[in-house]
Amino acid sequence: MSEELTFIQNRKNTITENRIEKIIWYIIECYLLTMKNKEKYSKIWVKKKTKLKFENYLRNRFVEDYLIKNKTILIQKISSLNEINFVYETEKEYIDLQDNITKMDKIDIYINKLGLQNEWKNKDENIYFALECKRITKLSDAARYVFDIQKFVNRKHINTRLPFEGQIAFIEDKSINYVMLRDKINEILKTHTTIITKSFLTEIVLNNKFNGVYLSIHKRNADIDFSIYHLFFDYSNIIND
């Protein structure tokens, strides 16, 4: 690759990473608002009054009540995200690299209108960032969490899905802290036979009011490196039986 192309690629990656990290900062702000508002979500109420899985209910409330309603907080920090769009339960096509068949990818939280069309040479609505959500009711649920990483590894996306992914863990057990969950996920990754991990979950600071953020780097089967931002949200005081 020529020096000019390398410069362009590095600039594209730097701008994209900065944009994603501002979004992560905002997602944390929304989590902190849920804590400030002393939200309470009842598993019994959801079971009786809805047809939703509790995990999906938590995701929906977070998107509808916080990510969508408080976008001005993000726009004040970075005006280029003034059209950002948050949607839950979206489907996008991908090619399964294990059998080369096109399939549908169910995305927990789909985020587009990122203002990156100039960098990625594509329409803004086709460029997106995705987050997957998992309940952590016991430490062994880390295996389900890692399964989402495996899905990231084995998929080639048809639209411009950025080389950055996001994962949210709703921690429901008071006895599980951030470090315990991180260590358990890293333990699974170290012996995983199909996930190639170049950098295990390492703590990073993207919001000075929160310390449950980790970054890992993996390799897709398409031979492309990608990063995952891991957000561990303590929901143990938010969820009622």
Image (spheres, rainbow, N blue to C red):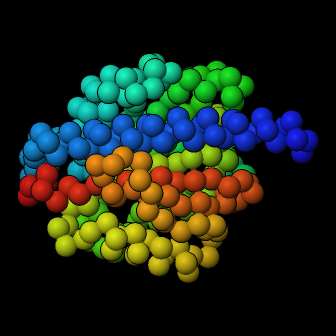
Look at the picture and state if 74 lies above or below 45: above
Residue 133 in the image: above or below residue 145: above
Residue 37 shown left or right of residue 114 in the figure: left
Residue drawn at x 69%, y 30% as measured from the top left: 120
In the figure, residue 74 lies in which quadrant?
top left
Going by the picture, which residue comes out furthest to the front?
Answer: 208
Q: Position of residue 168 (x, y in %)?
A: 37, 52
Give left or right: position of 235 versus 140: left
Q: Is residue 145 above or below residue 82?
A: below
The answer to whether residue 171 is left or right of residue 231 is left
Point out the image quarter for the N terminus: top right
Tell me: 128 left or right of 137: right
Observer-nearest residue: 46 or 35? 35
How many numbered callouts? 0
Q: Residue 94: tell me if it is visible.
A: no
In percent of width and height, residue 236 lies at: 16, 59
Residue nearest the observer in this picture, 48 or 199: 199
**Residue 239 visible in rendering:** yes
Residue drawn at point x = 12 percent, y = 39 percent: 37
Residue 230 screen position, x and y as percent: 43, 56
Which residue is located at x 62 percent, y 46 percent? 163
Residue at 53% across, 44% down = 105
Q: Position of residue 24 (x, y in %)?
A: 42, 42
Looking at the rendered image, the quarter that the C terminus falls into is bottom left
With respect to residue 56, does 233 lie above or below? below
